Image (spheres, rainbow, N blue to C red):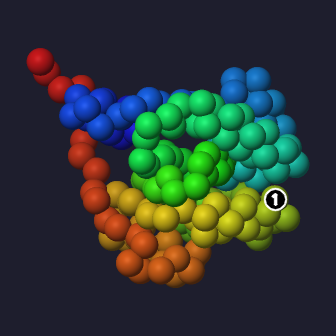
Amino acid sequence: SSAALLHALERRGALAGAVDGRAGAITFAERAASFAPDIERWKQRANAGASFLSPLARNAMSRLSARRAAAAVDGADTLLQLTGYFDPGRPRPGLLRCSYHDGNLAGFLRRPDLTIAADSRFARWSLAYEQRLYDSIDVIFCMSEQLRQSFVSDFGQAPDKVVTVGAGANVAVAE
């Protein structure tokens, strides 16, 4: 949905630029640090940011995304973030900071097939990190009312700050 959203904004002339806050080497290292012999447990640890390397990875990606965002927001009035995994900050005063989400860590940790400890030290750290991130964002857009309720109840966000906008199918449009 992220790529489709960016393309739609670009087609409407509403996208001044886009940057990626992820770094391949950091992502690879964090996934390796999440290793578990059971493949599903490995995937869940990596997706939850629940490895010993996750705090360092999030902080490194936050610094990287902050530098990239600062270089890309010239003339923009809004910064739209498409993940809760890292924090680009507010590149300049007065810039409206928004985010769009198709999920969050609190919801992920309630999965019925969860194989990792939802109360592990690293999962708790990641939840606290996301809490601080969401507290710093002006408007949170989410794809469902259920997710909106999670931001309000799990992360204590003001109901008028969290807006359900929905999500369409993630398929290519025939031209």
Q: Position of residue 91 (x, y in %)?
A: 61, 46
Q: Is residue 109 visible?
A: no
Looking at the image, residue 125 lies above or below residue 168: below
Q: How many marks?
A: 1
Query: Residue 166: x percent and y percent?
Result: 27, 57
Instruction: Give left or right: position of 164 versus 37.
Output: left
Position in image of residue 171 (x %, y %): 25, 31
- Left or right for 99, reference 35: left
Q: Residue at x 78, y 46 (%)?
A: 59
The percent coordinates of residue 82 (x first, y second) are: 48, 45
In-front residue for pair 7/12: 12
* In the image: residue 60, left or right of residue 134: right
Name the residue at 24% across, 41% down. 169
Check disc 1 and report the residue beneath it: 122
Query: Looking at the picture, which amino acid does disc 1 mark?
Result: Phe
Q: Is residue 106 above or below residue 33?
A: below
Quarter of the image for residue 31 reads top right
Quadrant of the rendered image containing residue 7: top left
In this rendering, the answer to whether 143 lies above or below 46 is below
Q: Nearer the viewer, residue 95 or 129?
A: 95
The N terminus - image quarter? top left
* Residue at the spot 38% in from the left edge and 78% down from the top edge: 160
In the displayed orientation, state which residue is furthest to the left: 175
> Which residue is situated farthest in the right direction here?
52
Identify the residue at image location x=50%, y=34%: 74
User: Quadrant of the rendered structure where residue 22 is?
Assistant: top right
Quadrant of the drawing holding the C terminus:
top left
Which residue is nearer to you in this view: 68 or 3?
Answer: 68
